[in-house]
Image (spheres, grey):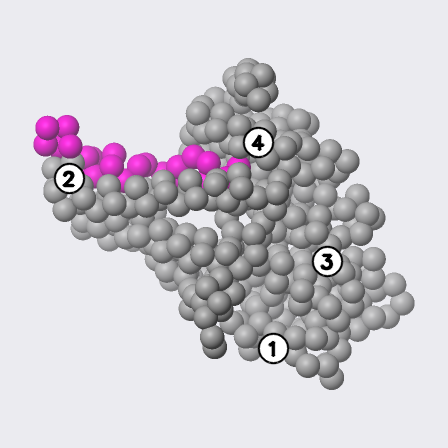
């Protein structure tokens, strides 16, 4: 493995451009998002050619084909030079792994190479106005007509739908079956007349979520994943990939997205003997950083102990629950450290970073709701991890 490490280190040094190191733009495959940093595109192209946008996916589809140990070495060496992930999004983190689990060979050959090369962006069609936490109550209908499913209904909180080329969607194909049955999982081209997307403006001022409307939209029959009326199993598996956070080990969290809390505190609170001047903040930041580091180590340990980094089952709810809490705590600390300067919404009295801090704080409130609320995660942990009675 030391020979492989040396090879990776040498290749990264020669191929990771300066503009792909440290915080900055990470591409997600969408042609609708401008590329602000040419080095980000160069980095994506070079990593995709090597297969390292998806290091452990099979080489047959363009992946890296790395072993678990090689994968962990790549992560380590990327972090050592502060290399950002070349690619992020629901293609690599959600639908790609799900296709590897449930897709036909034809589906894998048609969709996975485009994901790996960063040529397509995906979004998730799960929640509906009347089916959020109780997702199995969804009512969006799909009726098979020849070689296509005709889809009518509405989805909500569809993250990034305004930038997406494709959607993976849960639909009801048998309205007379019990609610967990009669659901199918399929892939839908977003660039068609029957799909309308309306971004939702949030309290943070951003619009990462959307309403999506389907009026006789079409999904090809060959893009049904798994069996008709058995999509609940596929949908649950995808959520395990989403909640695990394991894909983020080579994702956007490989490097910080902003200044470290300790550096921020020194800037706003000053120093005493080289340490953060405010003793309470010094203690709270240290506590957060230790927990965040322990969390990252736990994620990597799960990868190291699993069979070729397969996503674990219900234990992913522990990752989702703690990850949400950690994200919110970091946003809280960043806002508090800035004091009154962390409460600025607009105006010349506040810097761009200070205004972004408040928006990040507001956005972070949703972390304990999306992908299954914290309450749902605790129920899963209690029942399926700890084996507690209902």
Judged by depth in the image, the label closer to the viewer, 1 or 4, is 4
Residue reaching furthest to the bottom = 176
Q: In this picture, is 299 found above or below 388?
A: above
Binning the other alpha carbons within 10 Å of mark 3 as few (below 14), some (14 to 19) or many (20 upward) gives many
Residue reaching furthest to the left = 272
Tell me the distance, in whole angstroms, between the alpha carbons under discs 4 and 2: 42 Å
For the residues bearing labels 1 and 2, Cβ distance under 8 angstroms: no
Ranked by sequence position, the earlier of labels 1 and 2 is 1
Q: In this picture, is 150 found above or below 177?
A: above
| Rendered residue at 71%/48% (across/down) | 100
Q: Position of residue 125 (x, y in %)?
A: 62, 63
Q: Is residue 354 magenta?
A: no
Q: What residue is pinned by disc 3? A: 187
Which residues make up the magenta segment? 249-275
For the residues bearing labels 3 and 1, Cβ distance under 8 angstroms: no
Q: Which mark is residue 137?
A: 1
Q: Where's the N terminus, which quadrant?
A: top right
Tell me the distance, in whole angstroms, between the alpha carbons under discs 3 and 2: 51 Å
């Amino acid at each position: 493995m030391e020979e492989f490490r040396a090879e990776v280190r040498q290749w990264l040094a020669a191929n990771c451009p300066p503009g792909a190191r440290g915080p900055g733009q990470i591409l997600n495959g969408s042609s609708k998002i401008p590329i602000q940093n040419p080095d980000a595109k160069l980095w994506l192209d070079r990593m995709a050619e090597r297969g390292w946008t998806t290091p452990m996916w099979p080489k047959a589809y363009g992946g890296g084909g790395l072993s678990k140990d090689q994968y962990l070495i790549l992560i380590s060496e990327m972090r050592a030079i502060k290399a950002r992930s070349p690619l992020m999004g629901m293609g690599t983190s959600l639908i790609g792994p799900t296709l590897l689990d449930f897709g036909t060979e034809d589906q894998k050959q048609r969709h996975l190479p485009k994901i790996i090369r960063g040529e397509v962006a995906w979004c998730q069609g799960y929640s509906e106005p009347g089916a959020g936490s109780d997702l199995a109550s969804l009512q969006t209908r799909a009726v098979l007509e020849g070689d296509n499913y005709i889809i009518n209904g509405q989805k909500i909180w569809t993250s990034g739908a305004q930038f997406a080329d494709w959607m993976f969607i849960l639909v009801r194909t048998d309205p007379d079956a019990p609610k967990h049955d009669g659901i199918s999982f399929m892939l839908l081209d977003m660039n068609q007349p029957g799909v309308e997307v309306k971004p939702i403006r949030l309290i943070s001022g951003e619009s990462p979520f959307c309403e999506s409307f389907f009026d006789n939209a079409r999904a090809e029959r060959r893009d049904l994943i798994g069996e008709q009326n058995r999509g609940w199993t596929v949908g649950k598996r995808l959520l395990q990939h989403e909640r695990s956070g394991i894909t983020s080990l080579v994702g956007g969290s490989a490097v910080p997205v902003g200044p470290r809390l300790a550096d921020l505190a020194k800037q706003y609170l000053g120093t005493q003997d080289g340490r953060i001047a405010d003793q309470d903040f010094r203690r709270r930041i240290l506590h957060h950083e230790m927990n965040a580091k322990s969390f990252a180590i736990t994620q990597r340990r799960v990868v190291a102990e699993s069979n070729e980094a397969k996503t674990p089952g219900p234990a992913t709810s522990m990752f989702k629950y703690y990850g949400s809490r950690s994200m919110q705590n970091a946003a809280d600390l960043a806002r508090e450290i800035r004091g009154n300067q962390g409460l600025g919404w607009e105006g010349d009295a506040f810097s761009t970073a200070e205004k972004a801090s408040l928006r990040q704080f507001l956005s972070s409130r949703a972390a304990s709701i999306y992908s299954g609320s914290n309450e749902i995660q605790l129920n899963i942990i209690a029942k399926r991890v700890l084996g507690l009675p209902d």
